[in-house]
Image: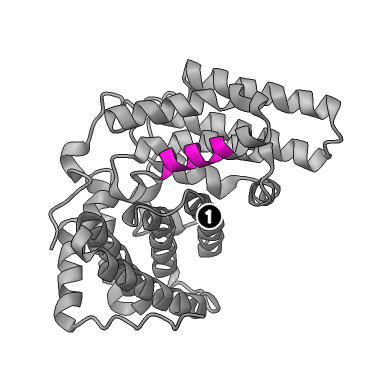
Amino acid sequence: MQPPSPLVEPTRMQELELMVHWMNFTCKTLSHGPPDYEIWHKTIPEDAVHHEFVMDGIFALTSLHIAFDNASKRLYYTKLAMQYQNSGIKKYQRALEEPNEGNFHALFAFSLITTILALAFPNACPGLPLFSHKESIVSLVELLQGVAAVHRACGPTFHKGRFNAFWQPLSYSNRCSDDASAALSRVRQHVDEMAKSESLTPERHKAYLQGLESLEKEFGSMHGSRHLGPILSWPANIDNELLQLFKNKDQMAEVIFMHYGVLLLHARDRWWARDIGVCLIEGLTISVCTLDPQWTCLTQWAERAAETAIEHGRLSWPVDDVSSFYGSSREPSV
């Protein structure tokens, strides 16, 4: 057994450097525009003054941002990010034991940051095997379901408070694009055929169909909007049965999550989600088609979407482009 890696000891000057980088660059890569930028830039740092786990979360995500942009410093800042994340999680878990009006916003902020960290670690550390992206998605689902639990604990008036910009109504077509609708219909048809020919339990059948129905809704939300909310909404609301099937390498569950990978391609211009959609699709395609090459017809649309995203940098966006506000995915580094 190898000895544990020595702890990285950041200086006060380095921590100040991290906060400056957060304020000037990292927080912009998390927002959609002025309303929620104010939350990331001002409100969440104010919470960090009173709740150390939020400060740890800010430092963890900023360290990872710097690691992403600086190959020569990648190992150091990735270790630093992991340390801050582990430290923050311990303090967060203690705070979760006594949720109250004084820490609701801090708990919610940290849960969001750790969710983004789950997506960001594989992107900041290129060269990891493909399965790391699958593990990252499992962590993402579990974390987002925790976010939903924190939100419920905060009470019905929480979304009207200091974080209200996160719940502003979105304008979108609510209509799934024709190609996405056709792809999901093919998968749904295959599920129905499985139900007729296999001993498919009602719980498993229901989990498949609910996952597909929810995906179609989120694709509709993305069609005509640049907002990334649907990317986090789907994993937060899927049935736990589907997650367990995915963990156990169930072939149909992997196909459904592969199509979720297409949603993730819409965040490809953000450093924290740069490659995860492509890698998830590639890894799951290998897994699904190795088990049964006849399932290739269910993977082709997602594969083409990944190829398009690689060719163009991301999937095509509608006209309401706000990229001029939050800037490039690769911000200047410290």
* Membership of 282 in magenta stretch: yes
Q: Is residue 70 rendered to the left or right of residue 269?
A: left
Q: Pinpoint residue 285: horizontal percent, then vertical percent.
A: 55, 35
Q: Residue at x 49, y 16 (%)?
A: 178
Furthest toward the front, the residue is 1
Instruction: Report the quarter where the C terminus lies.
Output: bottom left
Is residue 51 in view?
no
Q: Position of residue 56 (x, y in %)?
A: 33, 74
Whether residue 332 is visible: yes
x then y, percent, for residue 261:
48, 38
Near-viewer residue (296 or 238): 296
Name the residue rendered at 27%, 58% in the picture. 40
Instruction: State how the image is colored.
Output: one colour
Front residue of 275 and 227: 275
Residue ID at (39%, 59%):
117
Bounds of the magenta span? Answer: 276-286
Q: Name the quadrant containing residue 80.
A: bottom left
Q: Does dot 1 land on a helix, a strand or a loop?
A: helix
> Are there few (<14), some (14-19), or many (20+) residues within 10 Å of tag 1?
some
Q: Main secondary structure of the magenta part?
A: helix
Check residue 107 for magenta coloring. no
Q: How many marks?
A: 1
Q: At label 1, which amino acid type do we have?
A: Glu
Q: Is residue 43 left or right of residue 88?
A: left
In the rendered view, tell whether residue 5 sits above or below residue 318.
below
Q: Nearer the viewer, residue 101 or 108?
A: 108
Q: Quadrant of residue 215 in the image?
A: top right
The residue wearing badge 1 is: 135
**In the image, 109: left or right of 200?**
left
Looking at the picture, does residue 334 appear above or below residue 9? above
| Residue 51 image point, x, y percent | 35, 77
